[in-house]
Amino acid sequence: MNNGKSSTGFYTMGILALFMAGFLLIVIFGANIYKGTVETQDANNNTRAILSCISSFSKSQDPGHIKVASDNKLGAVLIVEDGDTGYAQKVYGYKGNLVQEYSKEDSALFPEEAQVIGKTDTFTIEEKSAGMIAVDTDAGQVLLHTGEKEAGGR
């Protein structure tokens, strides 16, 4: 009879160990799924931040206030003038990020002090036609109207 009680204890401990192992596996799988979901959400947020920031420039300014400049070290720079204040938003790529700074239109760029918009290895600006430029990033392409008119246009 004593032998029956000890085998019941072993079965109970075995079942408990089995449930604990199953519970641990469920926690590990759940943590991996959560991690993947958060990484996907971060990527989507980065894409939205970059594209919405760039596209908002064409909506926030009057035509003619968007310019493209070139910097020897940083490459293409999108400049959005702030009306008649003499200041401008300057957007450009720096060390794998899209950055933005607000400063005098003719001042030098300070990428170390600029605000990071999002991660992107690509930032190119191409003139599609007179008055239209395409800004390409890892997140996609945004078309902006600069306000210039084609020759012979209205």
Image (cartoon, rainbow, N blue to C red):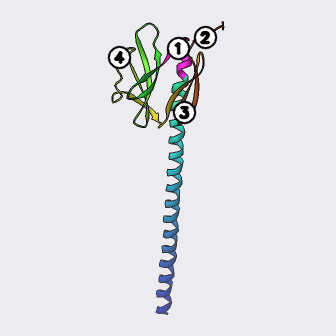
| Amino acid type indicated by mark 2 | Lys
Q: Residues within 10 Å of mark 2 (few under 14, many from 20)?
A: some
Q: Earlier in the sequence, mark 2 or mark 3?
A: 3
Q: Earlier in the sequence, mark 1 or mark 4?
A: 1
| Amino acid type indicated by mark 1 | Gln
Which of the two marks, 2 or 3, is nearer to us in this view?
2
Q: Nearer the viewer, residue 60 or 142?
A: 142
Residue beneath label 3, please?
48
Marks 2/1 in contact by CB < 8 Å: the verdict is no
> Secondary structure under badge 1?
loop
Which of the two marks, 2 or 4, is nearer to us in this view?
2
Q: CA distance from mark 3 to mark 1?
A: 20 Å
| Residue located at (51% from left, 56% from top) | 32
Q: CA distance from mark 2 to mark 3?
A: 30 Å
Give the numbered dot on residue 61: 1
Q: Residues within 10 Å of mark 4 (few under 14, many from 20)?
A: few
Residue beneath label 2, please?
149
Range of magenta residues: 56-68
Give the numbered dot on residue 21: none
| Residue located at (54% from left, 54% from top) | 33
Which of the two marks, 3 or 4, is nearer to us in this view?
4
Q: Position of residue 112 (x, y in %)?
A: 33, 30
Q: Nearer the viewer, residue 151 or 17?
A: 151
Q: Position of residue 81 (x, y in %)?
A: 46, 14
